[in-house]
Structures are given as C-alpha cells and as structure tokens.
Amino acid sequence: MSSERLVVVGSLNMDLSVTVPRLPRPGETVSGADVVRGAGGKGANQAVAAARLGAQVRMVGLLGDDALGSELRERLAVEGVDDRGVRQLPGVSSGLALIVVQQDGENTITLSPGANHHLDVPALGTLTGGTLAHSADTLLLQLEVPLPTVLAAAHQARTAGALTVLNAAPLPESGRAELAELLRAVDVLVVNETEAQGLLPHAYDDWAEHAEALRALGPATVVVTLGADGAVAADAHGVCRESGFSVDAVDTVGAGDAFCAQLALSLGSGTPLGEALRRACAAGALATTRPGAQSSLPSTDEVEALLGDVTRRHEGESEVHHAC
Ligand code: ADP
C-alpha cells in the first residue's frame, strides 16, 4: 500500500444520472432509465480515486448545509478521505450535477456549482489553517472552483515544494490571464482533447506535437488523454504514448478522474512518466467498466490486475519514444 500524501483542493457535487438510448437534442425529450444518485464533483472524485488507489488524501472544499452536503461529507469519510478541510456553508446549496449517459457511454453534464463557487481565497486560508501542503505532498487541482483560489493553491504548493498537478477541466470561459498564470505555476498539466484544443490557438496534426506546444505555456509535463485511444505525454525528455486498454466501456464518467488521481500519485512517488501514463490509462479504463462517478473508481488491486493482463491490451505494447 502506498503512503503517498495527496491534497485535493476542488469541488464536491451530488450527481444525478439518467441513462438514455441516445442524448437529446436541444428542445427534445428522451425517456431514460431510473435516476442513479452518486457522489461526484471532480475534486471529490479525484480525492476518492486516490484513496482507493492507496494514498493518504486530504480534501479541501465547501458543501452546502443541506442534506446532500451531509451525505457527501459522510461518503468522503467512508472512503477514508481526511475531510477536516471540508466545511458546510450555512444558507448555501451543495453542488449538483445532472448527467445524461448514452448507452455507449457518451455523456453530457449540466452543473449547478452551489457551495463550490464560494471557495474563494480567504475561505481556502480558513479551511487549510494557512498550511496547504508540505514538500512531501502532491497537490491535485481542477477548475470547478474559482480560478483565483486554484491559482493561490498552486502558488502555496510550489512555495512548499510540493508537486502540483492541474487537471484543467472544465476550461473557464473567462479569466484567460489568470489561467495563463496558473499554467506557469503548475508542474503537470492533464487535459482531454477538447481542453487541449481550447488552450491553443490552433490544433497540431499530432497529439504529441500538441502536448509539446502546451509545455511552452508553462507546465514541465503535459498529458493529453485520448479516451479509448489512451493518452500521450510530453516532458523535457521527449514524448510517451500509451495506446490504452481494451475494456467493455459502459459509462466514461469518472474515467478522467481515475486517470488524474493515478497519474498524480505515480508522478508524486517518482515513477517514470511512461509507467505513470500506463498505470493512469489502466485506472481510467477500469472506471469506464462501471456506471457512475465515484462508484466506478477502481482499487489499486484492480489496476495491478489489468496491468498484468496483457491479453486485454490493444494490439502491441505501448509505443514509447522516451527515456521512460
Ligand atoms: P475525459 O473523461 O476527462 O474526457 P478521456 O475520455 O480522455 O477523459 O478518458 C481519460 C482516460 O480514461 C483515457 O486517457 C483512457 O486512458 C481512459 N479511457 C477513457 N475511455 C476509455 C475507453 N472507452 N476504453 C479504455 N480506456 C478509456
């Protein structure tokens, strides 16, 4: 069992999911199955993912003082996540995500941020008692809480000597200058294809080239996730590609969160980039085999089992052009 220490500053939501035969178009109604209720929010998902993968995890974030908030806090505790940095704000609603999932796993998400939007810089200071991270920690960030708070957290972690990993999701519609500053303040950037394209004025022919171009924005390591096609990563030593794992995907919700948690833990413990990428792809793939966000997150034993099961891999070994 790993003793990696991870701090997550981010969102906590309740997810309400409905599976439909196909996603509705604007103005259209499509009937689906019964509602499935699950704990979510990219911050909490990545915190729980890391806890299941064997890390000591501290969550920093805000909930409403409603029943959903109490339930979400309880679920964090059940997962073994240190929730002393989580508070329930009086008179505020907890974050809520409305998720519609097509039968092939494709999904849309509508978000009501609620208490997550109240996580400003003073609140961050109150929740952490002024000490966010130590040098042995890895800080994992996403963009479902206010950008100035994410930026402050990244600066504090860097000052403390912690490894800072940013999953730049979802990309903000405003605050480009702050986002540019944030990219210069993090060590590792993880984005999916849409986010990768949103960060650059034009797309490159090849995702490896795109990842290299993103490195010029600041992060020493950039990882682009490519869904069923795996992921590509670039750092100062070159490029790594992982072709992904062949699994029966039922719902891709949670895949990116499992990927980010595993990647952050591996890089935080000094695992070479190529191996970290492979482990992260295994965690992401496993999360697609079960429905829901936190309910789909794999354990470290499941990741080990998939890594050992070479017959379930896409053709060939991972293509590596890197000292990894
Ligand atoms: P996001 O959900 O954030 O858009 P991706 O869809 O790229 O991110 O998924 C994150 C990671 O999860 C991928 O890099 C891949 O390793 C894994 N993954 C996602 N979908 C599948 C799939 N259908 N089969 C196997 N692995 C998958």
Image: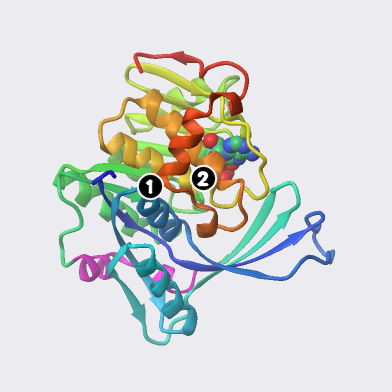
**Where does the image place residue 240, in percent across and percent down from the top left?**
44, 20
Q: Secondary structure at mark 1?
A: loop
Give the quadrant of the N terminus. top left
Return the residue at label 2.
256
Q: Which corner quadrant holds the C terminus?
A: top left
Q: Amino acid at mark 1?
A: Leu
On the image, the x and y values in percent for residue 141 come to: 36, 51
Look at 43% across and 33% down and name the residue there.
279
Question: What segment carries the magenta color?
Answer: 112-128
Residue hosting label 1? 53
Q: Is mark 2 within 8 Å of ligand 1?
A: yes
Q: Eyeballing the image, is 267 above or below 205?
A: below
Q: Which of label 1 and label 2 is nearer to you?
A: 1
Question: Position of 42 compared to 84: left or right?
Answer: right
Is 283 situated left or right of 275 in this image?
A: right
Which residue occupies 38% across, 68% down?
A: 78
Task: Point out the tag, 1 or 2, that comes first from the N-terminus.
Answer: 1
Name the one closer to the observer, 153 or 38: 38
The answer to which image quadrant residue 30 occupies is bottom right
Residue 135 placement, left or right of 272: left
- Amino acid identity at mark 2: Gly
Helix, strand or loop for the magenta stretch, by majority:
helix
Q: Residue at 42% of width from left, 70% of height from top? A: 75
**Mark 2: few/some/many CA within 10 Å (<14, 14-19, 20+):** many
Which residue occupies the foreground of this view, 204 or 1? Answer: 1
Tell which quarter ligand 1 is in.
top right
**Label disc, if present, on residue 144 of the rendered structure:** none
Q: Tell me, yes or no, if residue 198 can be seen here.
A: no
